Amino acid sequence: MQKKEKWIITALGFFSLCLAVAGIIVSQRRVTENMVSVMSFNNWGLSFREEGKAPDIDVDKEMLKESDAYYLGDEDEKKIYLTFDAGYENGNTEKILDALKENDVKATFFLVGNYLETCPEIVKRMETEGHTVGNHTYHHKDMAQLTTKDAFLKELTELEDLYREIVGKDLVKLYRPPQGKFDENQLQWAKEAGYKTCFWSLAYVDWDDKKQPTKEEAMDKLTKRIHPGAIVLLHTTSSTNGEIMSDIIKAWKDMGYSFGQLKDL
């Protein structure tokens, strides 16, 4: 073999090796980018440090503002924004609606597809009685698993379509991330779709059907932790909430609070 041919073969081999290394680097970079996308998700959390004051949050407030995301109203106004998450019905929602009607309070109900499918008449009652229905996604998935804009928006638009079919009106574009899991990209996608993302500044452990707090425990936490501008998250599946709803509304009113609608923030 001539020296020139050997040089060509060696050069081709080296070039192939470079391409292979470059391919590995690109692949690793893509994997890393995907991992960063998943690991960038945050879980919404609150730290209450002072009774009657809004809690601390471990999230960039400026980022929330830029993304049309809310967790708190005006801290100088004694107004409460009452919201409920509803994934399924177990006999408590209508008790809550009765208490809201009795006390002339309007709330926002964040619903999933299952609730719309199984309880269309209750959903219609929410609308008829002046409450707002927000979007809690169709399937209540772990949104950390949805890394594309199309997959994310599908969860919102499918619920919009079913709500329109049942109620005959468009859904108010308020979005609450399931389990409070969120990513900056998804907050922007929601904003681009016309949504405001709604977190909360007050909640308590009310979602476990098998371990419900007592009425006294619930009243104590919800009165001590209430604060001006509070966006309150409760669950309609809670039997305790069904029992205390009228009492807690009256207690908050006695403390000088009024009630606003989340859509007006």
Image (tube, rainbow, N blue to C red):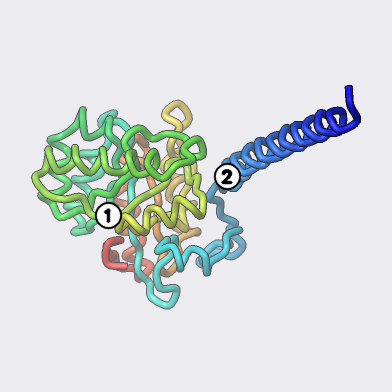
Which quadrant would residue 194 be assigned to in this image? bottom left
| Along the viewing direction, whichever of 231 and 37 lies nearer the viewer | 37
Cβ atoms at labels 2 and 1 below 8 Å apart:
no
Q: For the point 57% across and 44% down, which residue is it?
A: 37
Q: Indicate the position of residue 198 as horizontal and vertical percent values.
A: 39, 56
Give whichever of 146, 125 is nearer the camera.
146
**Residue 161 x %, y %:** 19, 40
In which image quadrant can residue 154 be found? top left
Res. 249 visible in picture: no
Q: Which of the two residues, 168 or 1, is positioned nearer the viewer here?
A: 1
Residue lying farthest to the right in this orientation: 3
Q: Say which amino acid is labelled 2.
A: Ser
Residue position marked by numbered label 1 in the rendering: 173
Task: Pick the quarter of the image with the C terminus.
Answer: bottom left
Q: Can you give x and y, in whole percent of width and height, for residue 46 in the image?
A: 56, 54
Residue at the extreme top of the image, as rendered: 1
Quick check: 165 above or below 263? above
Rendered-image quadrant of the N terminus: top right
Instruction: Identify residue type, mark 1.
Output: Lys
Residue at the spot x=45%, y=38% of the render?
A: 214
Identity of the residue drawn at 66% across and 40% down: 26
Q: Dot 1: within a 10 Å radius of its alpha carbon, few (fewer than 14), some, or many (20 or more) residues?
A: some
* Residue 37 disc label: 2
Q: Judge from the rendering whether residue 127 lies leftward or rightward of residue 42; answer left or right.
A: left
Image coordinates of residue 245 in percent, x first then y, are 31, 48
| In the image, residue 100 above or below residue 209 | below
The residue sitting at the bottom extreme is 76
Q: Is residue 110 left or right of residue 71?
A: left
User: What is the count of numbered marks?
Assistant: 2
Residue 259 shows up from this direction: yes
Q: Residue at x 42, y 69 (%)?
A: 228
